[in-house]
Image (spheres, grey):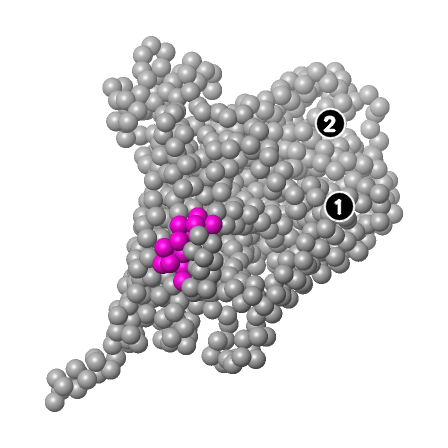
Amino acid sequence: MSDFETDYRHAKPGQSGPGVTDYLDLDTKDETFLDATELVLNMGPQHPSTHGVLRVILKLDGEKVLGTECIIGYLHRGVEKIGEHRTYAMFNPYVDRMDYVASVSNGLGYCEAVEKLLSVEAPPRAQYLRVILTELCRISSHQVWLGTHALDIGALTPLFYCFRDREEILKIFEKYCGARLTTHAFRIGGCLYEAYDGFEQDCKKFCDAFLPKLDEYEELLTTNRIWVRRTKGVGILNPEDCIALGVTGPVLRASGVKWDLRKAQPYESYKDFDFEIPTGLNGDTYDRYLVRIEEMRQSVRIIRQAVDGLPTGPIIAKVPKVIKPPVGEVYHSIEAPKGELGYFIVSDGSTQPYRMRVRPPSFVNLQALDKMVRGLLVADVVAVIGTLDIVLGEVDR
Amino acid sequence: MLDAITGYLNSGTTPGEYGSIFWATIYILVITIGISLAVIAMNWLERKILAHMQIRLGPMRVGPHGLLQPFADALKLLIKEDIIPEEADKLVFWSAPVVVTMTAFTTFLVVPFGRTHAVTDMNIGVLFMLGISSLGVLGIIMAGWSSNSHYPLMGSLRSSAQMVSYEIAMGLAIVSAVLMTSLQTGTGTLSMIGIVEAQNAQQTWFIFKFFPLGFIAFGVFAIAMVAETNRAPFDLPEAESELVAGFHTEYSGFRWSLFFLAEYAAMLAVSSIAVTLWLGGWMRPFPNFLSGPAWETAFSFIPALALFVLAGMCLLGTVRMPKIPQMRVQTVGLGIFGTLLGLVGLVLLVPAVRERVQDIFWFVTKVAFFMYLYIWYRGTFPRYRFDQLMKVGWKVLLPIGLAVLIATAMVGLYPELAAAVVGVVQ
């Protein structure tokens, strides 16, 4: 993105000269603004529907999108570099701030990666607790996605329905670990907190109450003619493109690729549970919507099984007070709500990682934006940004 | 002099027809203030109703149940800094909101709130309304172009394309209603008052005429009018999630509030066309089933009763208010508001007032129904995409409108047509 700095920031359409090159192959050398057939529209970083501080430069022919350029980095906090200057335990809360709508999943991925480095395994009870909280977090992340996605397409009401029901999940988080969003729920080696009294009942109550609510969302959208028109056939990604671009998560599954790390390389106790991986057929926005809705149902199934089978025993494995993993490197990835969330950690045997690298799903999925929106209209750009379910905290880190 | 003024009151005509400049001025003032108040009320109602559809409370802080929120907002907008972008075309930028507001208010010249309650009765009333209200798009284009910015430009382009294409379907639906006015007299009328009187003469609202033809024409109009006023689900010109705020992105403060005012006034205007053409204008419901002096008297009490119900709701609200010192001002305010409504209701019981006001009441009630629909759409539907919007306009509404027009004409001419066919066969 560095060459952008010199090229684009000061370039206006129709302006040419030294230092101004055509980033999007713009042929505007001798055209004034009014003669130009192409319009360059700067969407973001302050825009209602770029989900934070994403900046998209659109090259338009009327309303038709000829090309896009994503400019990221407005929320860059150097999380990976921070990780190299903190001890393993100290970095744990930072990962919650990457994908801040699914912080529990971030914490899970990090804790597991360090555990793998230490060759430690969390006790069964901790694993079950982790699964319950992570699946709750998946539901809450999908609820935020559904609300904002519907809002982008112009339906105002689902947002409030989703946030109303998400509140119940956040209450469970708050009762469990004291925080609602940036939870820091897990520790390296297991969990710090034992499930509070009534945790099982709360989870079950949520599951029972949530399924009818899910039907309510579907009632508003699934068969709504405008919703179907706005999403069917929009932003199609075929399986080959998905794999070539490294797209993961619901976006990949909606294209018909049955790839879910919870099944493909089971971590924690996911192999104990009976659940299905929903896939789509066409790889369009409507299929991605259906896949995520179905994923919420499957998460409820997992939570119910995990709560019923919650074993007793310790909740944290024996981990040394000062974590000094042996020299080596590890890559561990989990199925976060948005896709494959991977941590690559290189240890030099000291208390701090030598190298910390995060593979966030949003960052990789965002690559597909240009492929998906070429030839569509401006209105579809916001629909596609919504359906990719990006969180800029995770894209920029 | 005094006779010239009071003479009008018993004339049973509009001020325009009677030729009284004095009363015309009074009417124009009353309508202007009334529309502004209606927009303020709509602002509050929309926020409250939408909020309750979305499981939240809406404004609750300024005044009891946020009743004073629109006034607070208006005050805030008035004292905001007035910004004209440096690159903007200043004259056009300045005049765009004026054009939009002027056109939106001018349409109300011919709206008949009652048999005598219109500023004037033009024999081309419907055409006048359509013509003036479509001038509003000019102001939107001016706003979008003069802002010299991409989002407003795209918003105004969308707006012009949308309004032009939906006006055709709208026009066809209106023509089929105008055709219906000619059924008994042989000559149709474009006068707004004439159309309502034709419905009175034929003893039916045009929405029920030649069922389902009248209903379909009304449906076409009801869809087209939402698109015409740029409201959800056709709110593309100001689609927040795509174009930030569309054509008024660069506007702020008082100029922005003029756009707001114009949008709601335009909604009221097209709703009153719909009410006049299909829902019997100022006529009360069931004029033919429940006729007779007794029913007349009974129905004439309804406006007062409606106000009493509203007053009762307010007073009940004061009882239900939390009994804490912080809420005392709000409780008293709600009580005063309820009492005022009750007093207005009492005034409406006076026979002379009762007779003159009930047609206004029915008209306003019907328009309010459309306003509720607007809010309901906004709470329910996602937004159309631009090409889909055009497709709905040209490929769905236009053919339906044409078909309904032809079908209405054929059904209306059925005796003549049948006679002609029989003649040819013989």
> Is residue B423 shown left or right of residue B90?
left
Chain ID of residue with mark 1? B
- Residue B20 lies in the magenta-colored region: yes
Outermost residue toward the bottom in this view: B426
Q: B241 above or below B395?
A: above
Q: Residue at x 46, y 64 (%)?
A: B10
Q: Quadrant of residue B180?
A: bottom left
Is residue B299 something that shows in the picture? yes
> Is residue A324 shown left or right of residue A339?
right
Please provide the residue range marked out in magenta.
B13-26
- Residue A83 lies in the magenta-colored region: no
Q: Position of residue B72 (x, y in %)?
A: 63, 38
- For label 2, the residue is A92
Q: Residue at x 63, y 33 (%)?
A: A99
Chain ID of residue with mark 2? A
Is residue B227 something that shows in the picture? no
Q: Position of residue A119 (x, y in %)?
A: 74, 30
Query: Is disc 1 in the same subunit as disc 2?
Result: no
Residue B330's tag is 1
Q: A64 above or below B105?
A: above
Outermost residue toward the top in this view: A18
Q: A8 above or below A294?
A: above
The residue under label 2 is which amino acid type? Asn
In front of the other: A373 or B66: B66
Q: Residue at x 31, y 15 (%)?
A: A16
The residue under label 1 is which amino acid type? Gln
Q: CA distance from mark 1 to mark 2?
A: 49 Å
What kind of element bears circle 2?
helix
Q: Quadrant of residue B217?
A: bottom left
Q: Position of residue A147 (x, y in %)?
A: 59, 45
